[in-house]
Amino acid sequence: MIVLGIESSCDDTSAAVVKDGRRVLSCVVTGQDSFHEKFGGVVPEIASRRHISVIDEIVRKAVMDSGVPLGDIEGVAATCGPGLIGAILVGLNYAKGLAYSLGVPLVGVNHVEAHLFAARLADIPPATPFVGLVVSGGHTNLYHVQAMDQIYLLGRTVDDAAGECFDKIGKLLGLDYPAGAQIDRLAADGDGAAICFPRPMIRSGDLNFSFSGLKTAVKNYIAKLDHTPEGRELCDIAAGFSAAVVDVLIAKLLVAAKQCKVGRIVIAGGVAANGLLRDRAAKSADEHGLDLFIPSLSFCTDNAAMIAASGTRALQSGESSPWSLNAFASLTKGK
Ligand code: KG4
Ligand code: ZN
């Protein structure tokens, strides 16, 4: 089955053509960082307007790159939530128009669950069941994936997402938005034990997360300095902060694997690109006899290949969405 996926839930416009939910024939992604940078975060209206400007070009390029004639596309999958409503509506409505004109089914995809499908695009995909952590700019969600159509939320952040915390700390440190990758690079040259920041909710007894207190702790630490941190000190702050985030993520992931009695863990989403998280996850998996799966870097961040992969699972089970399908903003609504 050949499915075209469309992603526009935040600030990346992406289209991909995927065969049988596993083989990526093309995947085109264009970001908008330069349009949001000066605001220190994503401005929803600007995001929607950028999607409108580029979506047709991105979809055409994805189809062309795939070498698949448009008439061979058997379904169109589009993110319908969660995310920025105005941004989602651009991709979703484009998908509706395209599916309708091709005479193929449309399927709406849950963006956060789709991050878990990114792991299935690797040469060796994880078998189910597994515990999956989706850690991105908008979400920090822990799932028990019993099968790819039986995905249960175990816990989530009660305030900021981990990636959001990286971006906010980056802003305090004078880094460009998004700051995750820059903090990652600085942390590699710092000492994670030099400054001990709090590990919020690490022993909360549940599988939820909280990062806003950590953000405040770093903010207070910087405010107490009588100078702008740079050089070694900046690297140590980045390393201490990263170590705190990673400690909490790994601790909860291991508890979830134990509780669900699974031998496989998956880490997906933009923050899964983090070097310290990848290293620590690999070591912990080894120590606890778990198999670890992390998508390749290009499929960790937002992309339409994971949307097509998730949509293919639905279409192959005979599911499709009505033309009246709406966008939803938060995880509590819709599917
Ligand atoms: O999955 P994604 O592309 O978009 C969302 O769905 O949010 O994730 C983007 C997030 C941003 O917050 C960015 O700062 C963070 O992922 N990120 C990283 C790294 N690369 C991207 N965070 C930590 N370390 C990285 N290497
Ligand atoms: Zn995402």
Image (spheres, rainbow, N blue to C red):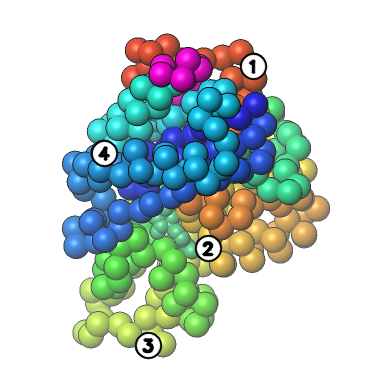
**Type of residue at label 4?**
Ile
How many neighbours does mark 1 have within 10 angstroms: few (below 14), some (14-19), or many (20 or more)? few
The reply, left or right, for residue 128 in relation to residue 280 is right
Ligand 1 under 8 Å from disc 2 Cβ: yes
Disc 3 versus disc 4: distance between alpha carbons?
Answer: 41 Å
Label 3 belongs to which residue? 231
**Which mark is on residue 317?**
1
Instruction: Give percent across and percent down for residue 164.
Output: 36, 53
Span shown in magenta: 100-109
Q: Residue furthest right?
A: 289
How many neighbours does mark 3 have within 10 angstroms: few (below 14), some (14-19), or many (20 or more)? few
The reply, left or right, for residue 244 in relation to residue 256 is left
Is tag 2's residue or tag 1's residue first in the polypeptide sequence? 2
Q: Which residue appears at 51% of the width and 67% of the height?
A: 243
Q: Which residue appears at 47% of the width and 15% of the height?
A: 103
Instruction: Give percent across and percent down for residue 176.
Output: 29, 68
Please identify, in this view, whether the residue under mark 3 or under mark 1 is nearer the observer: 1
- Residue 206 position (above or below residue 237): above
Is tag 4's residue or tag 1's residue first in the polypeptide sequence? 4
